[in-house]
Amino acid sequence: MTDMSALHAQLAAAAERDGVLDVAYRVVDGPVGALLLAATELGLVRVAFAVEDHDAVLQGLADRVSPRILRTPRRLDAVAQQLDEYFAGARRSFDVPLDWRLSAGFRSTVLHHLPEIAYGHTASYAAVAQLAGNPKAVRAVGSACATNPLPVVVPCHRVVRSDGAMGGYLGGTDAKRTLLALEGAA
Amino acid sequence: MRRVTGKRAFEAIVVEHGPTVLRVCRAVVGFADADDAWSETFLSALKAYPDLPVDANVEAWLVTIAHRRAVDAVRARARRAIPTDQLPDRARPPEPDRDDDLAAALARLPDKQRHAVAYHHLAGLPYAEVAAILGGSTDAARRAAADGIAALRRTYPLTEYHDD
């Protein structure tokens, strides 16, 4: 009997071929737990921690991007491999196309500046506000990080409080500590 | 994140309804063509999904697509049919939970009865939905399913079949 997973894989391939696979996703495991990775045809659109509730994240993608969503690994192969390398300490930055459509305005500006904080380093919320061109917008930097649609890949974990405390993290403070320890920054 | 009363991710539709639609395809077009019928049904459904009303009966919608596809395929085959001396391809090896006797008994039913049995008894659609797919009245759909089940009782040899 043909099993459902083979039919499912054929469906995903046909959907990709016909240009109707608006969002592809897969879930990968790593030192910060299960990460959901989702990509449009333009690039990686969402990285989500388990604490964000992957079902809720998928519903958000259906509402805000498209309900044409299938679980299929191929489109996420490159980022999954780079995450493996990163978690193994063998990669310091990510080189995959990003689809920024889930962030807008000043928050998006902030997120675009985060890759300027080098691997293994941290910056304060105030310093990032300055980088983003609005030194007074410290709280807005905090909310930009808290709503980062592409955590880990866009390194909001490198943003910490001015007093040296770690500050919050959308994946939980344990995940932030793990990532900073991995990078040798804490 | 902004919440909109949303349509579910299509993935959830495939996971929830995929096995039932495959059973329906096997009953309606037979084992040999069922996988293709399933794939075409879900690909058509994926394309049309953004336009499906949020409160639509998804299973009835999928079965409707599968039904149209099956009817079109039968018509296309009738148009293409030409006499041939060639033997058909060698049969596939037997599959574990495949029931050739039931498949053969289903295949012998008139189309309308086979469709009514598949959509009501396999897909679980109420007769009103079956009638909407087949055309005709709800009573006619009920009669076609009952006649189909009665014929299967006569022609299908196993005794443990239960009509629900």
Image: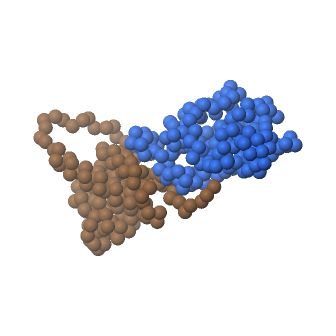
Q: Say which quadrant the N terminus of chain B sits in.
A: bottom right
User: How many numbered badges does the structure rendering display?
Assistant: 0
Residue nearest the observer in this picture, A151 or A114: A114
Where does the image place residue B147, in percent across and percent down from the top left?
A: 26, 67
Q: Is residue A76 left or right of residue B37?
A: right
Q: Quadrant of residue A87?
A: top right
Q: In front: B8, or B1?
A: B1
Residue B16 visible in image: yes
- The blue chain is A
The residue depicted at 70 percent of the width and 38 percent of the height is A114
**Residue A63: quadrant of the picture:** bottom right
Q: Is residue A8 left or right of residue B127?
A: right
Decide: is B93 above or below B140: above
Residue A98 in percent (x, y) is at 58, 38
Residue located at (31% from left, 57% from top): B67
Q: How is the image coloured?
A: by chain
Specify the quadrant of the image occupied by residue A132.
top right
Measured as percent of width and height from the top left, residue A43 is found at 54, 39
> Where B50 sits versus B88, above or below?
below
Q: Residue at x 67, y 27 (%)?
A: A91
Q: Residue at x 23, y 55 (%)?
A: B108
On the image, the x and y values in percent for residue A150 come to 64, 42
Question: Can the viewer see residue A48 in this picture?
Answer: no
B54 left or right of B154 in image: right
B5 and B100: which is toward the camera: B5
User: Which image quarter holds the C terminus of chain B?
Assistant: bottom left
Chain drawn brown in the picture: B
The residue at the far top in this view is A90
